[in-house]
């Protein structure tokens, strides 16, 4: 499965060129949120650059067990009866973690990147064409209180922001089709 996934990600993201870091942090964060919106609306991969891991590919994925990507993450939260606002806040926090969270190697070819109680799970896939890092899931079980507080803060502070509203609209579209 991973070899086919690797080839698909490379095909989808061939034209993606990571952006430089000459912008301020807030602009980069907004750009990263827009990238998540683009993945959900176009189903094409995007890249968010982590400070130590490097390029992390964000893909649409599938809402099935043992899958990966944004649809998988959204579906997992739907199974827990979370609201669209909570799911949007989690995606926002995952975006933030990927951008500049603390990373730890996990089981050889995986990384866990944590910030604000949210852990983005990133798998490193290797083939003869090279290595890519791919967002495959999330975790908040070890830091539930911190994650819950961060989720509520994002909803309270950013729900009127245009980028957040665009992301929420895409989350609503995905949840209505799962």
Image: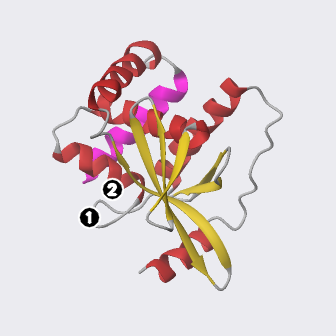
Q: Is residue 134 above or below residue 83?
A: below
Cα separation, mark 1 vs mark 2, equals 6 Å
151 within the magenta span:
no
What residue span does the magenta drawing correspond to? Answer: 162-178
The answer to whether the residues at label 1 and label 2 have Cβ atoms under 8 Å apart is yes
Residue 12, horizontal then vertical, whole percent: 60, 68
Q: Which mark is residue 64?
A: 1
Was residue 172 drawn as part of the magenta stretch in this picture? Answer: yes
Q: Quadrant of the N terminus?
A: bottom left
Q: Residue at x 83, y 34 (%)?
A: 22
Numbered-mark total: 2
Classify mark 1: residues with Cα within 10 Å, few (<14), some (14-19) or many (20+). Answer: few
Model colouring: secondary structure
Residue that sits furthest to the top in the current view: 157
Compared across the picture, whether 35 is left or right of 94 comes to right
Q: Looking at the rendering, which quadrant does residue 8 occupy?
A: bottom right
Between 52 and 59, the residue placed more toward the observer is 52
Is 40 left, or right, of 151 in this rendering?
A: right
Magenta stretch, overall SS:
helix
Residue, far bottom: 128
The residue at 35%/63% (across/down) is 62
Residue position marked by numbered label 2 in the rendering: 72
Can you give x and y, in whole percent of width and height, for residue 33 in the image?
55, 36
Quick one: SS at disc 2? helix
Q: For the residue carrying disc 2, how many other residues have a C-alpha within 10 Å: few (<14), some (14-19), or many (20+)?
A: many
């Amino acid at each position: 499965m991973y070899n086919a996934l690797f080839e698909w990600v490379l095909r989808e993201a061939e034209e993606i060129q990571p952006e430089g870091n000459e912008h301020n942090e807030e602009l980069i964060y907004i750009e990263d949120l827009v990238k998540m919106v683009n993945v959900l609306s176009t189903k094409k991969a995007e890249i968010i650059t982590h400070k130590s891991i490097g390029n992390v590919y964000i893909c649409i994925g599938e809402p099935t067990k043992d899958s990966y990507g944004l649809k998988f993450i959204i579906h997992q939260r739907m199974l827990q009866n979370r609201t669209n606002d909570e799911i949007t806040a989690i995606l926002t926090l995952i975006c933030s973690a990927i951008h500049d969270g603390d990373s730890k190697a996990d089981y050889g070819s995986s990384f866990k990147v944590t910030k604000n109680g949210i852990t983005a799970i990133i798998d490193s896939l290797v083939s003869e064409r090279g290595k890519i890092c791919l967002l495959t899931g999330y975790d908040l079980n070890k830091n539930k209180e911190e994650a819950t507080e961060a989720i509520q803060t994002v909803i309270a502070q950013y729900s009127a922001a245009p980028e957040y509203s665009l992301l929420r609209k895409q989350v609503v579209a995905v949840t209505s089709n799962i």
